Image (spheres, rainbow, N blue to C red):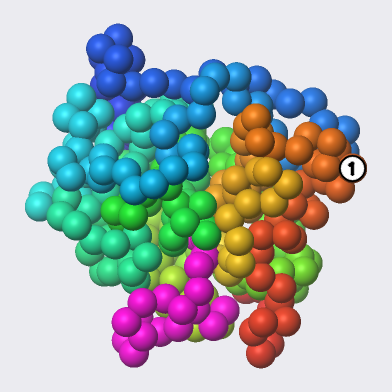
Amino acid sequence: MRAERIWQDALAVSERARQSGALVPLKTRLLPLEDAEPFVVRELLCAPPRHLRAGGPRPNPFLPWDAPLQVERFGNEHVVLLNKFPVQQAHLLLITQDWQPQGGWLRASDWRSVARLARDTGGLWFFNSNTTAGASQPHRHLQLLPRQAGEASCPLAVLLEAQLQQGKPLWPWAYRLSRRLDPQGHGDLPELYAAHCRDLGLGDGASDPVPLHPYNLVFDDHWFLTVRRVREHGAGYSVNGLGFAGYLLSTGRSDHDWLRRHGPWALLQQVAAEHSVIPRLRSIG
């Protein structure tokens, strides 16, 4: 069993930060959509936070980071922060303490800090490689939605597990899905990341200065998913890595009627690269 100390600390920090105004939880409601299951679609009921608004350059919120949102520092490399505008309580960000670009390759130090946090608190991890993949900030950050032991990490977890059991891809976009081989030690993450990037034509960290295409990572203790992206939004819906986990957020720009007619799967197909962009879509495994 995990200690979940960081999660518990995050809940305590959340309460203090909310009372001081440093934390601004987003008000949402479940949007009832026929035939949308298993997707969870929430409608934003307040003004969009800064990172969801169109506009020019914005200051980096992580240099320096907002001290009331800090949960824990990991040496001199990373710090665990609360997401300032959460939908879920204790939404955690793992950021680099110095400047590292979101659009660069994830490094060994990033994966070490992921492993350190994951050994204490489990849940759904995701990473948006750049703005086309849904990243709201250019400073490197991975995100964790904590989950209790035995709780499904996301709405699409059952379907992802079914694909692993069947051993073949079922979706018409460019993605790789692999079973986690070291869910406790987390030593498999760098290798899975590198293999998926090569398979999807994203490049090789050993020879390419930066990834060649935008992408999302989504993973938990059991599986690791990488999706190659071509655009950030469809039908007015901004889609980041959580979309491929089954979570969508509707704002004032979103076309509800389009989503009702076509469904969430069609939305994902709009924003992901077609599988034909890579030479061969390998088996799941």
- Residue drawn at (34%, 48%) of the image: 57
Nearest to the observer: residue 250 or residue 153 = 250
The residue at 52%/60% (across/down) is 132
Residue at the location (29% across, 53% down)?
A: 139
Q: Quadrant of residue 252?
A: top right
Residue located 68% across and 43% down the image? 236
Tell me the quarter of the image containing the N terminus.
top left
Image: 237 above or below 215: above
Left or right side of 189 for 111: left
The front one of 172 and 134 is 134
Q: For this view, does 255 lie left or right of residue 117?
A: right
Quadrant in the rendering for residue 10:
top left
- Residue 211 covered by magenta stretch: yes
Is 180 inside the magenta-drawn segment?
no
Image coordinates for residue 11, horizontal then vertical, percent = 34, 22
- The magenta-colored residue range is 200-220
